[in-house]
Image: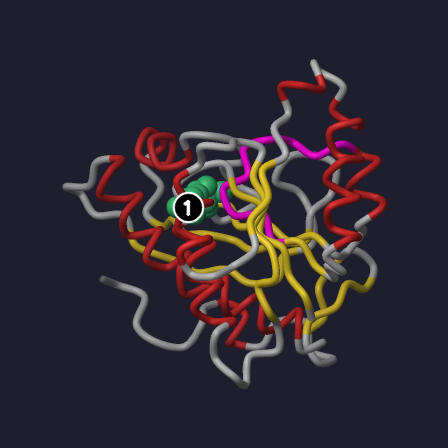
């Protein structure tokens, strides 16, 4: 399966995907890294890894989001991409693009969805006093941070945490969870049925609740 990662910034999740895809037995290749920000640090990092990169800046489209995404779609088609992994891509995709790539776009979000959609999840978790936090990989739907959940990883919230320490603990799990979830999708083990993800005929095997291994740093 040929995968494109969409990024807007540092690209640490993209690098985690690239690392997994480099293993000979992994069922996906990271064939393209695309960004709406030409200066995104992650684009240079991907290029240094020998991965094809493409900037498709949104500004020239002056607010015509669909036109921007038609340009992106043409890039994906030319690169024969099968699956898109959003990895810190800071734009909401249009319904047109999401439908065109239905069940072929996945996203990582730094919360236990459906709680804490949107930005500043770590700060908001601390404000509410939630005891558990984590990250989610899900198939993308037109509404922000919605769609069938593929896998989640959980971290505890410590009394002494601030947003930065919590973010770091979650990010460590993101880097394990995203390759795990991509492997499930690319191998065909995870598929959408009735807006839920079915994993090899079982709704929720333990490996989808948390990837194996200790979750605490
Ligand atoms: C991650 O926390 C991801 O969950 C969120 O945006 C952040 C991107 O970080 N969607 P990076 O660019 O992968 O380092």
Q: Is residue 155 above or below residue 211?
A: above
Q: Residue at x 59, y 44 (%)?
A: 54
Query: Which of 25 and 146 lies nearest the eye of the viewer?
Result: 25
Which of the 4 image quadrants contains residue 15?
bottom left
Quadrant, the N terminus: bottom right
Quadrant, the C terminus: bottom left
**Residue 119 place in picture, x, y as percent:** 47, 30
The answer to whether the beta carbon of the residue marked 1 is less than 8 Å from any atom of ligand 1 is no
Q: Residue at x 77, y 53 (%)?
A: 78
Which of the 4 image quadrants contains residue 211?
bottom left
Q: Residue furthest bottom?
A: 25
Magenta segment includes 168? no
In the rendered view, does 185 fall on the left or right side of 193?
A: left
- Part of the protein shown in magenta: 85-94
Query: Which of 151 and 206 lies nearest the eye of the viewer?
Result: 151
Crowdedness near tag 1: few (<14), some (14–19) or many (≥20) residues, C-alpha within 10 Å? some
Specify how the rendered protein is coloured. Answer: secondary structure
Circle 1 residue: 44
In the rendered view, does 203 fall on the left or right side of 183?
A: right
Magenta segment includes 88? yes
**Residue 94 place in picture, x, y as percent:** 76, 32
């Amino acid at each position: 399966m040929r995968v494109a990662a969409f990024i807007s910034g540092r690209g640490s999740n993209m690098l985690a995907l690239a690392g997994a895809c480099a293993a000979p037995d992994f069922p996906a290749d990271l064939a393209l890294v695309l960004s709406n920000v030409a200066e995104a640090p992650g684009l240079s990092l991907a290029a240094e890894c020998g991965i094809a990169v493409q900037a498709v800046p949104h500004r020239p489209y002056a607010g015509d989001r669909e036109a921007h995404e038609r340009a992106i779609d043409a890039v994906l088609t030319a690169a024969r991409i099968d699956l898109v992994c959003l990895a810190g891509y800071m734009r909401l995709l249009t319904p047109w693009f999401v439908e065109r790539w239905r069940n072929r776009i996945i996203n990582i979000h730094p919360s236990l969805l459906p709680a804490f959609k949107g930005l500043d999840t770590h700060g908001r978790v601390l404000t509410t006093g939630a005891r558990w936090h984590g990250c989610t990989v899900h198939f993308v739907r037109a509404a922000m941070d919605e769609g069938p959940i593929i896998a989640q990883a959980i971290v505890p919230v410590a009394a002494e945490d601030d947003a930065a320490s919590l973010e770091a603990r979650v990010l460590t799990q993101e880097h394990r969870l995203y390759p795990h979830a991509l492997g499930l999708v690319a191998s065909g083990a995870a598929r959408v049925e009735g807006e839920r993800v079915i994993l090899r005929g079982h709704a929720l095997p333990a490996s989808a609740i948390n990837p194996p291994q200790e979750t605490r740093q």
